[in-house]
Amino acid sequence: RDSNGSDSKKLRVEDSMDSPPSRVIHIRKLPSEVSETEVIALGLPFGKVTNILMLKGKNQAFLELGTEEAAVTMVNYYTAVTPQVRNVPVFIQYSNHKELKTDSALNQRAQAVLQAVSAVQEGGSPSSAAGESVLTPAPSPVLRIIIDNMFYPVTLDVLQQIFSKFGTVMKIITFTKNNQFQALLQFSDPVNAQQAKLSLDGQNIYNSCCTLRIDFSKLVNLNVKYNNDKSRDYTRPELPAGDGQPPMDPSVAATLGKDSTSLLGAISPLSAAAAAAAAAGRVALSGHTGPGGVLLVSNLNEEMVTPQSLFTLFGVYGDVQRVKILYNKKDSALIQMSDGNQAQLAMSHLNGQKMYGKIIRVTLSKHQTVQLPREGLDDQGLTKDFTSSPLHRFKKPGSKNFQNIFPPSATLHLSNIPENVTEEDLRLLFSNSGGTVKAFKFFQDRKMALLQMSTAEEAIQALIDLHNYDMGRGHRLRVSFSKSTI
């Protein structure tokens, strides 16, 4: 065989959608400049990747996994969640080949990458001669991390969880530069920084958003003055918090400094837990209650607010489990989301917005859950359990709703509109919620539309009143905020 040309022609014809399971996966429609590492990363969460063949000119690749089970889990996972490489959707199916036979000379670079990656996975450091060629000595133990497509807040703790898989994280500083969230993160050893960069650069932290862009920093040591939510030195728990926050509890610092396992198990495509979670159907951000899922909302309009209205508004950013309006302070409420990420998201989008004419304040509560009233105790309907509500937007794995999370805006996106409903009907319905409809536009199929109120406050009110509104014939109107204007 003088080249892989003749081989690849044969491969393309044979692979069909209904091939029986095989541990070799055929990947098509890859972006042209894609690297071996990025293709290997698609398979990594599911188990050991044992071989790879890139057909560069054809934008295709073959990936061989260690076991057929791993391959089946991978294909099943990516049926629910579209696999993406560099934000481009790619196609994945079983190959007719049961194993990959590759020309060793041609495939040397791929083998080197594989060795480096599997060494990282097994926690060792790459030592083989081939591995060395990919891993030139690391210039610094400090990485500079930029996060693209940040539709979901990424915190210092999230970074610590992800990066500590590759070694001991000593220090992290986060900051915003050119309107982008960035971080500097220092490992105890440059080799760990190198492995983290190799495995994580270009990966998404959450399902199809928050893409990591990683480089070595010119700094070789970070100087952290405060331990708070912006910066942390895990080696010095005694540092003050600076802006009035209490210093970190040393015992917490000690546990955080260790290689804590990722809490992003169910969310992050960067962990083997993703595979297990995917198999159980809990992909993306559902069914995963991490710490800090409870919000405290204050300065509410106590004449108007109800558990249902808070459920509807906060439900735009996550699945609200329970709501409790405080008995002796009815302008405040506790809201329990499905997990800490959803709580963060709701807080970042709703803090400072106007609801029923008052600017609401949203902060993370120290409570882990919202308690239901004791049996037989009447609390005037102030506490409501929404655990089994059919209205949760984010229950379905890989749901489109994850990609359509936007801050409150004057323009609303309406869907599930019955076919006999006219623009006039909708304009009338929305102006009844106490605002002015400025503009309206049906999508082509008339099942969806954009509708613009005069302010975001009016749109918030309309969403609370009309999301899930019964339009007749079993159609319930769906309302969310839009990033478009009309």
Image: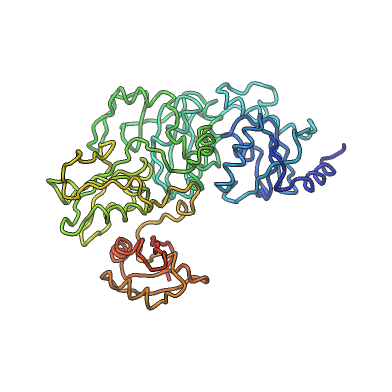
Q: Which residue is drawn at 22% across and 55% down?
A: 306
Observer-nearest of 177 and 41: 41
Q: Which quadrant would residue 115 be assigned to in this image? A: top right
- Residue 298 screen position, x and y as percent: 20, 49
What sort of colour scheme is used for the picture? rainbow
Image point (72%, 41%), residue name: 95
Give the vertical position of 51 relative to 343 (above or below). above
Which residue is at 60% across, 51% downward? Answer: 89
Residue at the right extreme? Answer: 1
**At which x and y percent is residue 2?**
87, 38
View extreme (front): residue: 376
Image coordinates for residue 81, horizontal then vertical, percent? 55, 47
In the image, taking residue 230 as reference, residue 379 lies left or right, namely left
Q: Looking at the rendering, in which quadrant would you find the C terminus?
A: bottom left
Relative to residue 69, is residue 485 depicted above or below?
below
Task: Examine the rendered structure and indicate whether residue 483 appears above or below residue 260.
Answer: below
Q: Quadrant of the N terminus?
A: top right
The picture places residue 160, in percent across and down from the top left corner, at 42, 32
Instruction: Choose between 240 and 204: the one closer to the eye.
Output: 204
